[in-house]
Amino acid sequence: AQRVTQPEKLLSVFKGAPVELKCNYSYSGSPELFWYVQYSRQRLQLLLRHISRESIKGFTADLNKGETSFHLKKPFAQEEDSAMYYCALNEGPSGTYKYIFGTGTRLKVLA
Amino acid sequence: DVKVTQSSRYLVKRTGEKVFLECVQDMDHENMFWYRQDPGLGLRLIYFSYDVKMKEKGDIPEGYSVSREKKERFSLILESASTNQTSMYLCASRRRQGALDAEAFFGQGTRLTVV
């Protein structure tokens, strides 16, 4: 079955420390993966998608098919990075794609 | 530049009531979704629609139904509200063409409390 696993419910780091939010997936085909973020009192929004190989707000994520992982990383955490982060996997036949979301990780960046 | 609008931010309803949650998008997206967001459980798909009058069940459709009479509007209906449906409900839309990497746009959420 298709599944996305985020093993950490809460991750606390100090400002300036490196951050790694873990995401593992189970998918039979070629996966398309995303990270979404929800800041306090804001809408859920796209952070980055693996197909674009982009870096947004200093965050990067590399798809590792061997380890079936798509971990989100940032070398130096900032207080404004504190938010809820969701990993998502695209699923479905062409035109009707839908997301499977992980359970989310709350990141707290401490001053 | 609000793109996905949910009709209510907070809603309190009584057990047994029929509840309507409305969602409107202005991006001419074909695909629309209703999710439920609960702490520790993440986002779970209730229903989605990939065209007008088309709908498919998601992972947790029991106790819910949906309506998509117009492309821009997707309604979630709780036929008989129960306390275990107290939750945050999120609506989202996404284009269909080239949708493999398409971004989903979310509404601000409706926090429903059933008493």
Image (cartoon, rainbow, N blue to C red):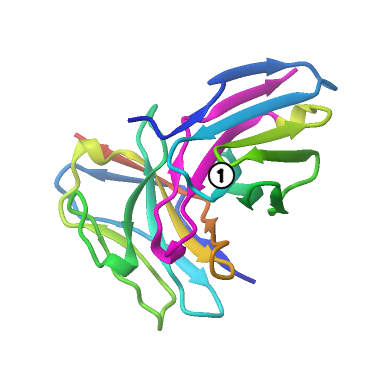
Three-letter code for the amino acid on which mark 1 is drawn:
Gly
A8 lies above or below A23: above
Residue at the (76%, 39%) spot, across then down: B64
Residue at the (67%, 21%) spot, across then down: B113
Residue at the (50%, 45%) spot, across then down: B93
Quarter occupied by the C terminus of chain B: top right
Q: Please state which of residues A11 and B114 is positioned toward the viewer in this rendering.
A: B114
Q: Where in the figure is residue A2, as x and y percent of width and height?
A: 59, 69
Element carrying mark 1: loop
- Using a 10 Å C-alpha cutoff, classify the residue at mark 1 as few (fewer than 14 neighbours), some (14 to 19) or many (20 or more): few
Q: Is residue B100 left or right of residue B53?
A: left
Q: Please state which of residues A101 and A45 is positioned toward the viewer in this rendering.
A: A45
- Marked residue chain, label 1: B
Q: Which residues are magenta?
A: B86-115
Is residue A78 on the magenta stretch? no
Q: Please state which of residues A71 and B58 is positioned toward the viewer in this rendering.
A: B58
Can you identify the residue that label 1 sits on? B40
A3 lies above or below B94: below
Q: Where in the figure is residue B21, as x and y percent of width and height?
A: 65, 28
Q: Please state which of residues B53 and A2 is positioned toward the viewer in this rendering.
A: B53
Whether residue B41 is visible to the viewer of this picture, yes or no, is: no
Residue at the (73%, 17%) spot, across then down: B13
Q: Quadrant location of residue A40? A: top left
